[in-house]
Image (spheres, rainbow, N blue to C red):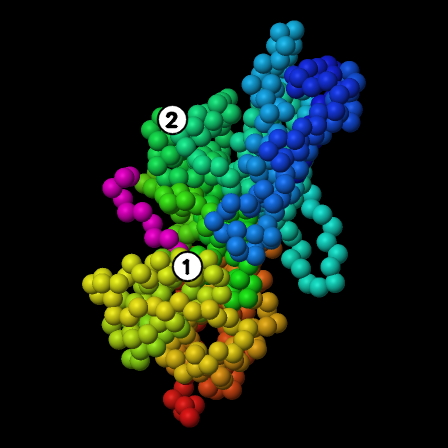
Amino acid sequence: MHLILKASGADAGIVSHLLAKNPLNIYDRVDKGVRVRMVYTAATENETEVLIHAEPDPVDLVRGTPDGYDITQYINDREFVTSSLFCSYIRGALGTALNGKPKEDYVQWVGNAFELELTFGPVASDLPDRVVEELFSPLGYAVSVERGELSYSFDLKNKSTVRHIILRGRNTVQHALRQLFLLIPVLDNYKHYFISEDEIDKIKRYGEGWLDAHPLKELIVKRTLRFAELIRQYERQEGALSASLGQERGIGHISEAIIQEKKAGHREEGEKEYLGSESDSDEMQLNADSRGPGECTDADVDTEIEDGNAKIADVDTGTAGGDGGQSEQSEPPVRLNELRYRAITDVVATLPVKRLIVDMGAGEGKLSARLAYIPGVEAILAVEPSGQSRLRAMERFAKLEGRSGVVAMPEPIIGSLFYFDEQMQNQDVMILCEVVEHIEEYRLNGIMDTIMNDYQPEVLLVTTPNKEYNEVYAMEQESFRHHDHRFEWTRAELASRCEEWTQDGNYGYEIKGIGEHVEGYGQPTQLVIFERRKESLS
């Protein structure tokens, strides 16, 4: 993780005094296991270039965490990418410049604008390049985004979420650094520290002079404060977040649905690769699981709106470009994830036979808990490979005990679509909610063959994103709603696969949509109802 600050032109040599670091001395400090180095690669009257590099201890990053037992702690990017961690590491080295308090002889230069080039990265952001540009271009920067060369022997997404960002423009050193310290965590969408009311003071201090006029102010504030109560407190002090350009395009409601669910430290539950996605969320939350109680996504506030990549639209609500100016009396839009659960439970409730249900990829058990209230259901297998998710599901299920209306207690079990489990055979209903898109396409035919010919559920329900609808979210053409998605299908592509899977005649199918319909694009989620034909029963 690094930041390169380069100033050129007349009086550029003054920048070293604003940073309060002598170009002839190498700044090299180790504090709490983190090594921070600051080296001048150019220092003349007309050019100053300084590299700031931070190197944390990767073991310290996970030591003492509640999920330290989980092997996926080894699969995270926190020790490499620029994030709130990086900002905290280098704050001490840049404190003089951030506060604008150099030696008295140079105070007059604090407000002087220099020709700057700022290079930082790697950045692991769920935001598409276009939104990254729209974060910095209003500040007067020309924005360049670079990705590393990918040369793998196997098929890999040709666009990684990891990038290096280069900004070029005229600005004061203090404003440039303050903007970075506020916007780097916005890009990363993760905070490693407890977020208190002090964060409101920080956003007002670092955003002074530019944030109020920024078209993506709502996005910046919500991603910085994260908690609904803190955002409301900010609005009480500073006024309601305006439904400006960003919100009209849906950016302010960056549904953590297009940004996808990940664990703290950008750690996705590794087991998703083996089963699919947790049916709790799917589309866009980079760090949703790292939130504490009450912490909100951009969709959780009064104007909440759903998985993928800073995209621009109600990703969690199923409505594109929600009306952020709605009154307090108006009902908040329903999140897309909730619409999925409703659609699935509605279908299950109407089935004549639904005694035995398998929720494959149950995650934290949100869908399974809803199924527990459907009359006629007698047993629910909540299948999930992630140990941590199963623990959360068990806590959720324990709260169902003794509740009025609960007809069946879900049973959390370990399972995967990649191996045969006789427990799954001859069930009445099997559900794959936002699961298949997390599996490599070439493996799906084998999995569907196992389900339809070996497990043979009476009804199979499958939900998956509608790729065409991504355009409504203003996502880039090659972007997926979740960084772990291996594919996303159009309506025609899904219909073609369903035809292929049912060609032996054992199952018929019907495809429906979930969420708000937009002419020409359909609905955000596709629901397939596979029903076993009576004549195929043995």
Q: What's the CA distance linking mark 2 and mark 1?
A: 41 Å
Chain part drawn in magenta: 327-336
**Is 438 within the magenta?**
no
Q: Position of residue 96 (x, y in %)?
A: 60, 18
Compared with residue 312, is residue 281 higher up or lower down, i.e. above or below?
Answer: below
Q: Secondary structure at mark 1?
A: helix
**Residue tagged by mark 1?**
391
**Residue tagged by mark 2?**
238
Q: Position of residue 435 (x, y in %)?
A: 49, 65
Kind of residue sitting beneath label 2: Glu
Depth-wise, is mark 2 or mark 1 nearer the camera? 1
Kind of residue sitting beneath label 1: Leu
Q: Is residue 213 visible?
A: no
Q: Quadrant of the N terminus?
A: top right
**Is 328 within the magenta?**
yes
Residue lying farthest left?
A: 404
Residue occupying the point 47% across, 61% down: 387
